[in-house]
Image (tube, rainbow, N blue to C red):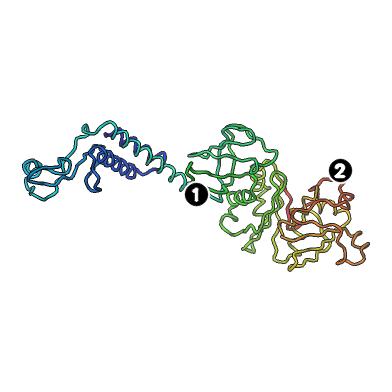
Amino acid sequence: MNKELIGALDALEKEKGISKDILIEAIENSLITGCKQHFGITKDDGIVVRIDRNTGDFRVFITKRVVEHVEDPVEQISLEDAVKINSKAQIGNGINVEIKSEDFSRIAAQKAKGIILQRIREEERKSVYSEYAMKEKDIVTGIVQRINGDKISINLGKMDAVLLPKEQVKGEVFVPTERIKLYVVSVTDTAKGVIVKVSRSHPDLVKRLFESEVTEVKDGTVEIKGIAREAGSRTKMAVWSNNPDVDPVGACVGLNGARVNAIVNELRGEKIDIINWSENPAILIENALSPAKVVSVIADDEEKTAQVVVPDYQLSLAIGKEGQNARLAARLTGFKIDIKSESQAREAGEYEGYNEESYDDDAEYSENMNDALPDEDIQDGDVEEEAGNEELE
């Protein structure tokens, strides 16, 4: 052992975050193990290893008992020889006798090396796990390495992760060396190594992006109360301000839309609707159906159902393309939402009595709603901004 090895240990400590003291301890243990195997020593305290932390020089000692007549030369030493090492040696005392490194067999040295490498791998895995476990439920930046069929290999810095198909956003295409943001779903330490599960489709990816982009969200002034997302297409997010002087929607949008546009760009053009959250379910549902205008909302907080009436010309907009707007509103609010136009409500005769179109978390278009789809020149989202609500592309 020499200064070159100490230099290598310093490099490992810097690059991989493995403590040099831990590695030196592993080397000491490996030398003790190799020495015991070579000399056939079974007792735990029979070998002592001393390593100089600065030079890398090491000395190995075997503890021998001072006896008058030596019967076991491995564990015993004569008084005559002991006095040469320590002039105060006496019969019955223990004395450390240095073992020269060349006395080790090749097999013992190889086993010691294997123990060192194993310890380095273990410590490296612990270091990687500790680092990425702290990033669980947060976002990280990764570099696309290669595309393996429907799986994407991502370099996260000290390790690689695989972006599985179910965690990808439909329509997103990446190229090698491209930098992307990912949400860390979980970090697991397994026998095969550390596994980091990442996602581009998780709703909390949007939340974390706003926390990193919007100061008021990061410091808690503005709270994100709920998120409903159909990855790659649209996200609805309800926000609330703990400071009456801070507009939560405006804070998230930013000057000239700078803040939200940065997030939209990261999400490859995914639309984001930011609405004001309210403790009043009726107001929350009205806001959630933005950008559509709402005539009335009757919400049953116990049954978690709501009856909504919208102007005739707003029906298709309230429902959204393929029912998306109503579906996301239902997810965001937790209410099953029945939407009816004013004409349909009048035909029904009694407002509470209608139940023709229903949208819940997994709602599909009904036949009546298909009849109310917008014409080709009317697109979901082509409306003016409503007070307190923003629809941004």
Q: Position of residue 32 (x, y in %)?
A: 26, 42
Which label's residue is closer to the chain start, 1 or 2?
A: 1
Name the foreground residue: 182 vs 310. Answer: 182
**Quick one: 60 or 285, which is closer to the camera?**
60
x, y percentage for residue 145? Answer: 56, 33
Question: Residue 139: where, in percent of width, then height?
Answer: 56, 47
Disc 2 marks which amino acid? Answer: Asp
Q: Is residue 23 above or below residue 225?
A: above
Residue 377 bears which disc, if any? 2
Q: Is 235 placed above or below 3 here?
A: below
Residue at the (25%, 39%) spot, across then down: 35
Location of the N terminus (image quadrant): top left
Disc 2 element: loop
What residue does disc 1 label?
133
Q: Is residue 175 above or below residue 292?
A: above
Instruction: Give the residue type at disc 1.
Output: Ala
Side (left or right) of 131 relative to 271? left
Dividing the picture into quadrants, the one containing residue 247 is: bottom right
Give coordinates of residue 372: x percent, y percent. Answer: 88, 51
Please tell me which residue is depicted at 60% across the width and 55% down the height of the picture.
217
Q: Nearer the viewer, residue 210 or 105?
A: 105
Image side of residue 107 versus residue 215, left or right: left
